[in-house]
Image (cartoon, grey):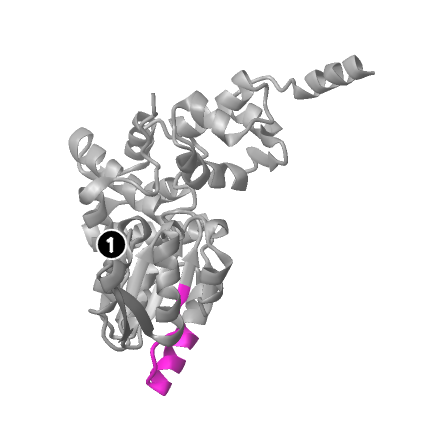
Amino acid sequence: MAIDRVLSADSGGMQEDSFNFSLRPQTLDEVIGQDTVKEKLSIAIQAAQQRNEPLEHILFYGPPGLGKTTLANVVANEMNAAIKVSSGPALTKQGDVMGLLSNVGTGDILFIDEVHRLSAPVEEFIYPAMEDFKVDFTVDSGMHAKTINFPLKQFTLIGATTRAGLLSSPLRSRFGMLFHMEFYNPEQLLQIIIRSAGLLGLDNDEESLKLIASRSRGTPRIANRLLKRVRDYAQVKGQGKLSIDIVERALKMEQIDHMGLDELDRAFLRALINVYDGGPAGIEAIAATLGEERDTLEDVVEPYLLQRGLVRRTKRGREVTRAAYDHLHLEYSREETTSNQQSMFD
């Protein structure tokens, strides 16, 4: 059975989406963190405005929840451009893309989330739109089929993906600017949470917000989500004010430990240790053991575990490190197991 998780950076439903949308920065000056990306974007935007041209096509890639969609909207605001939003899985045929492209004006932004999930026919259809701002659209079929060369307004395509390695080389090469989104440090997350708490009108002390930042896995979306969980807990169980005690109790209820790991993260580590003797084990095997989707483990769980040095990837599969045993308060016995296996071969 799949494990419920609070810390998923790519789920939450309409209520969470509207909550996060209300907290999103609208300009580059309001964006906290991602300093290198912001500097490059600022220069590109100013240069494009001085030349009175649309921006080059942009690709944002990195784990979910780090601000790819937010930056796409910020770019549109900075360029005073309209933004059309879609996603790779939603664009299944050429007609879907044609409907979007025909409504895009000069300088407008077309944002495609999960761009790596575009189908091959749709991807090939987009190539001339990105390069030459025109498409060849086939009308009817069979002996009555005819191809119409449809000119487009000059627009900017912004793609976002959590799996840059799955992008085809021809598609990747057509993006003029590629930006990797980094995890945030605790100080940056604290600034984000302070800003969000101010927008929500929360009564708090800075130490309680620091605690939330330290448990947010380097991800602003998770930080804002945890802030909402703690706010609800404080409203029901406390006096509405965020304090260290309230935050500790709220996060304990959500099963989030001092490192920011939730139950799915710990289940991932326990499966590797208890079922696969610490690894190596293939991701498909681990997913089957946990009853989770492979994409969930690769996109949401693994990046943070790798960053914290709890898991490592090898050619043979995933392995836990000694730090994972220590975190779960388990005895580290892999060296002894390895030596026993070696003696069998000797």
| Residue located 41% across and 54% down the image | 188
The span shown in magenta is 42-58
| Residue at 22% from the left image edge and 45% from the top image edge | 203
Q: Considering only vertical position in the picture, is 81 above or below 305?
A: below
Q: Name the side, left or right, on which 99 lies relative to 342.
A: left
Q: Tell me if residue 47 comes above or below residue 187 in the rendering.
A: below
Query: Viewed as shown, does residue 236 lie left or right of 62?
Result: left
Residue 9: say if magenta.
Answer: no
Q: Residue at x 21, y 63 (%)?
A: 99
Q: Looking at numbered disc 1 in the image, what kind of residue is underneath it?
A: Leu
Give x and y (percent) for residue 326. Answer: 56, 25
Q: Residue furthest bottom?
A: 51
Q: Mark 1 points at which residue?
A: 23
Q: Position of residue 35 (x, y in %)?
A: 45, 63
**Residue 329's spot in the image, x, y percent?**
53, 20
Q: Could you tell me which secondary element the residue under label 1 belongs to?
A: helix
Is-magenta flag for residue 43? yes
- In this picture, is 131 found above or below 73? below
Q: Give the quadrant of residue 243.
A: top left
- Residue at image position (53%, 23%) is 272
Q: Quadrant of the C terminus?
A: top right
Q: How crowded is mark 1: few (under 14 residues within 10 Å), some or many (20 or more)?
A: some
